[in-house]
Image: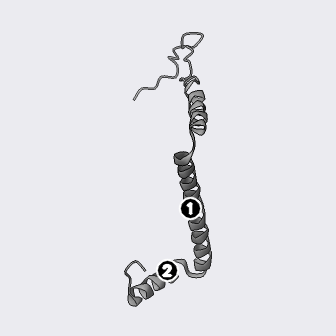
Amino acid sequence: MFGLGPMEMMIVGVIAVLLFGNKLPEVGRSLGRSLVEFKKGMGSIQDEISSASSGNSSSRTASTSKYNDIDDRDEATAPKFDPPASEPQDNKDSTATA
């Protein structure tokens, strides 16, 4: 496994116990769940790619029209700046000298 010998595996195990202590089973479970979710995601991506590459021309036109609908939408614009209704007032009373 990764080219590690028994001694290196023991060192990694001791370091893991020192770092995680009582939470080691919980960390292992969450790591396993994350790995399963990653594999599911990769599988769905592979299925999508294989179905797209083996699909017929009617499925290609449907996917093309979906992208054209997205392209026809208006682009988001920045909010419009509204200038203040009146000029700012000078407060000569509150000016401080250094």
- Colouring chosen for the image of the structure: one colour
* Residue 66: image location, x then y, percent: 60, 33
Viewer-proximal residue, 39 or 49?
49
SS at badge 1: helix
Viewer-proximal residue, 95 or 36?
36
* Residue 8: image location, x then y, percent: 39, 85
Establish if 74 lies above or below 21: above
Q: Is residue 78 left or right of residue 7?
A: right
Which residue is outermost to the bottom? Answer: 7
Q: Which residue is mark 2?
A: 16
Which residue is outermost to the front? Answer: 56
* Residue 23: image location, x then y, percent: 60, 77
**Could you tell me the amino acid type at mark 2?**
Ala
Q: Is residue 10 left or right of residue 56?
A: left
**Could you tell me the amino acid type at mark 1?**
Phe
Q: Which residue is mark 1?
A: 38
SS at badge 2: helix
Establish if 94 lies above or below 61: above
Residue at 42 percent of width and 26 percent of height: 97
